[in-house]
Amino acid sequence: MPANSTPVDDQSIDGVSRRRVVAGLLSAGVLTTAGCLGGDSDSIRLGTGPVDSHSHRAGQALAVAVDRHSDSLTLTVEPIGTASERLYAASERAVGAVGVDNTTLYRANQNQGAFDLDPVESLPHQGFMYGRLDHYWLTATDLDSTGGRDSIANLPDEVTVYPVQPGTPSRLVAGQLLREAGLWNAVRIDNRPRQQVPEAVEAGEIDVFPAVEINGQELAPWCQEIDDRVGERLGVLPVDDTFQSTIETAPNAITAEIEPTGWERADLPSAIDGWSLPRQWLFDATVDSEAVAELTRVAHEETETIQSVDRLALDRTEPTVMTAGVIPEIPVHEGVVSVFESLGVWESEWTRGNAVE
């Protein structure tokens, strides 16, 4: 088995030291401003990924919308780091809100992976979806001769599958789904960095991979390069009933019929069955409910302003777009609940958060 096919333990690949996170926040002077982060009805500090990351751009766009369309709220954006680091920052009350993907949130709630050794002591409450990553299986290999092209479940054991780069949100959810469907040990798993994948697919070293799209509007750069190199060879590898059921029962993923976007050379169907990974804004329970409700209102009503700053921003004028990422067993912040109820999109099985005074 090639070196890149050595299995990686995705249960711990996102390991982060809480001590390192807190030390970094102290050195940046973030913790020293904690007094104005939570419980202040007109000020929320939002923790995102690094500058130019998807969450940072989404946060900046939301801050612009708040500045233009709210008289009672101020939103500031603080680049922090990985999703795990952001959760630790929220737990330390360094920020009042953070942007996190649902896989990281679910793993923290279940004390899985890095959170097994270092749990998040105060998990923020759910808010609303600000983005998503869409996925569907593709192959550039002629699998018809092996009888393996009819679905992901029927791949022969010599096929090499690339479930995205280890440590990324897409990899964590793809690996989870493959394991739960009983497929992880049935094929070869490739672990190389994303930038090496287009050449590997072209050379036939990777047979199957999940395409990744951002908010249904843009193809991930490494997938765009695959299209440039071997687009005419690409075909869909359908999900079977078992894999579909695995998606439906995964608390951190959403089953989706995805309209492929960004492909120029590949001839793909107009819709492909796959899965989406939601990204949410989460709020510390102590952040004032009225402030969170105002932020939720702005996000819902001011799509035009948000999209003028972040071209990939979701259109949240339809409120179900905001609620699509809710994990039922994790509390939703009371301020968000009030808006969801007013819009008629609150579901009875969801857990209602109670503000901590």
Image (tube, rainbow, N blue to C red):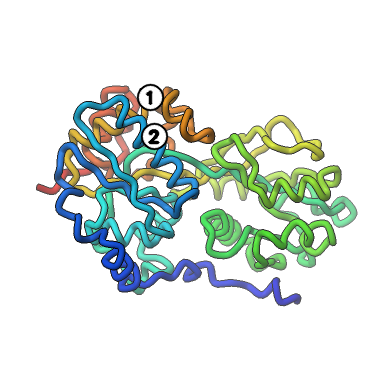
Residue 100 in the figure: left or right of residue 179? left
Tell me where residue 185 sits by quadrant.
bottom right
Tell me, for residue 302, which label it has, or none: 1
Quarter of the image that includes the N terminus: bottom right
Would you place residue 73 above or below residue 355 in this image?
above
Tell me, for residue 323, which label it has, or none: 2
Which residue occupies 45% across, 49% down? 252
Residue 262 visible in the picture: yes
Where residue 132 appears, x then y in whole percent?
50, 42
- Name the secondary structure under disc 2: helix
| Among the two numbered marks 1 and 2 on one chain, the one whose residue lies closer to the N terminus | 1
Residue 109 visible in the picture: no
Where residue 221 appears, x then y in whole percent?
66, 48
Q: Nearer the viewer, residue 251 or 74?
A: 74
Q: Are marks 1 and 2 in contact (CB under 8 Å)?
A: no
- Name the secondary structure under disc 1: loop
Which residue occupies 43% across, 53% down? 49
Tell me, for residue 346, which label it has, or none: none
Where residue 166 appears, x then y in whole percent?
58, 65
Q: Nearer the viewer, residue 284 or 307?
A: 307
Which residue occupies 39% across, 50% down? 48
User: Which amino acid type is marked by label 1?
Assistant: Glu
Would you place residue 211 above or below residue 185 in this image?
above
